[in-house]
Each structure stands twice: as structure tokens, then as C-alpha cells.
Amino acid sequence: MTANGTPLEDTIAEARRVADAAHAQKLGVKLLGGAGIHLHSPSAQHAPLKRKYGDLDYVISTKDRKRALAFFPALGYEANDRFNLMQGDRRLYFFDNEHGRQVDVFIDSIRMSHVIDLRERLDHEGPCCSPSDLLLSKLQIFEMNRKDLVDLTALLLDHPIESGSNEAIDAAYIARLTADDWGFYRTLQVNIEKLKATLEDLDVDRDLVQSRLAEIWKAVEAEPKPLKWRLRAQVGDRVRWYELPEEVRSPYQPE
């Protein structure tokens, strides 16, 4: 296998290699997660927000599914054929045996603690999802950890709040999604409070991050909520409002 088909040890270098190959093949593979935020946010590339990254997460359109099934193995990844056969309409899974790195590829939607439909949001240029979707892909995780909070801080430091821009955080878009789903609203509410608390431990421009969070939440609260949303809000936390996604194990990983 050529060097072009060998995954690199460094996760960020590998993310760039995948991005270059996807660009060359005009394949709409958009990077998510911490690595996506690292590529999109200079603050994630320096202390105190720089960190190590493990796995890679992507999202593609259904139309690119067949090509993705060939694309990642050509880059040196082992496909989890059983998982891809059973779940391949919504998600694909590949594994880098040499470096113990997994690649999750969501199709059309991110499905974790909540579902984020990205079918109309994958046509822009660049290797990553938009800052708004990178933000939501982290904020929707019910069991967020410190790494997620550090990544979110970098993203908020580096992106203004503007509507209709793929290079900014679109508060109006976030507000529309949370008005559609009380559970999504509630998870964002919980996680924004966690993020505010974490800021106290980070040597960054806290006021800037706080002001951008406040701007986002102001838009979320101002968005009109339908009856279904208001009825679910009355039930509140008495009924679980999020999913706990199961981790997919590679058949090549040891127990």
C-alpha cells in the first residue's frame, strides 16, 4: 500500500490528509468533533486550549455513502463490515489498526444524545462542518467531559455570533432547532451552565466567551415555542429527554 494509503499517527495531521484526499476527489466529507474545532479555531492550537485528539468523526450526505465506503479503506482504514451492513443507512464505522483510531461517519444527521439534521448544511467549502454545527455537535452531548468544554471555549473565542454565515455561529439557527425540541433545549441549557463554570479555570478571555453564550441564549429564549414544546417543558426533567449512545467497538480492538 502506498504512503497515501497509510494513516498518520498524529490525529490532526491525519485529519488534514483525509481533507486533502476528499478535496481532490470532490467528496463532501465534513469533519466534526474536537479535530474539526482544532482546524477551525486558532485558539485550539495553543495553550491553554491545545490538547491531544483521538478518534475522528465525520458527516456525509446519503449521496456520498457509496463513495465513502471505498474512500476510507483506500486511505488505509479497515471497514467494520457487519456494523456498516446493519447501520449503514445512518452511520459508517472504520478503524485504523496501527494507531487504534476509529472513524465514525454519520450520514445526513448526527445521532448521539440528540439528532441534528444536517442534510441542508453540507454544501459549503472547507473540510469541517460550520462553526454552528461544530458547536451543536458538542453541546448536544449529555455526558460532556472537560475536553468537550475546552473545545467549545476555543470555538466561541474565535467565532462571532452572526446569522447566515458559514464562518460564524448562527444563533438564529440554534434557536430554531431548540424551539423544535424541548429536550435539545434542555441539554443545551445544562451544558452552557457547565461551560460557564469551566471558564473560571481557564486563562482565556472569559468575558468574550460569556457574552457570546449570552447572545446565543437570548436568541434561544426569544424564539417562539410551539404547543408541543410547551407541553413537554411542563413534564420537565421527570422524564429523560436525551439518549445515551452506545460506543461502537471495532472487531479488531481487544476486549
Image (tube, rainbow, N blue to C red):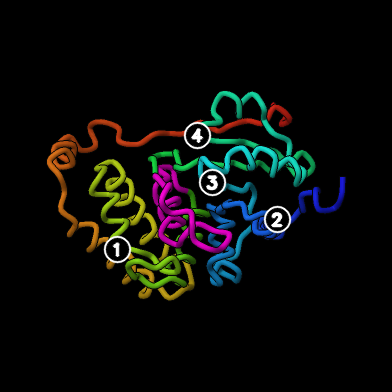
Residue 209 in the image: above or below residue 102 = below
Verify CB contact (< 8 Å) between mark 1 and mark 4.
no
Q: Main secondary structure of the magenta part?
A: loop
| Residue named by callout 1 | 216
| Residue named by callout 3 | 60
Residue 93 marker? none
Say which label, 4 or 3, has the lower sequence index: 3
Q: Which residue appears at 31% of the width and 71% of the height?
A: 211
Residue 90 marker? 4
Q: Which residues, given as a range, are shown in magenta?
A: 117-144
Question: What secondary structure is marked by label 4?
Answer: loop
Residue 93, quarter of the rendered image: top right
* Residue 139 inside the magenta-drawn segment: yes
* Amino acid type assigned to the residue bearing label 4 in the image: Arg
* Amino acid type assigned to the residue bearing label 2 in the image: Ala
Residue 160 in the image: above or below residue 4 = below
Q: Which residue appears at 25% of the width and 31% of the height?
A: 239
Residue 88, quarter of the rendered image: top right
* Amino acid type assigned to the residue bearing label 1 in the image: Ile
* Residue 198 inside the magenta-drawn segment: no
Q: Is 42 situated left or right of 194 in this image?
A: right
Residue 75 in percent (x, y) is at 75, 47
Question: What secondary structure is marked by label 3?
Answer: strand
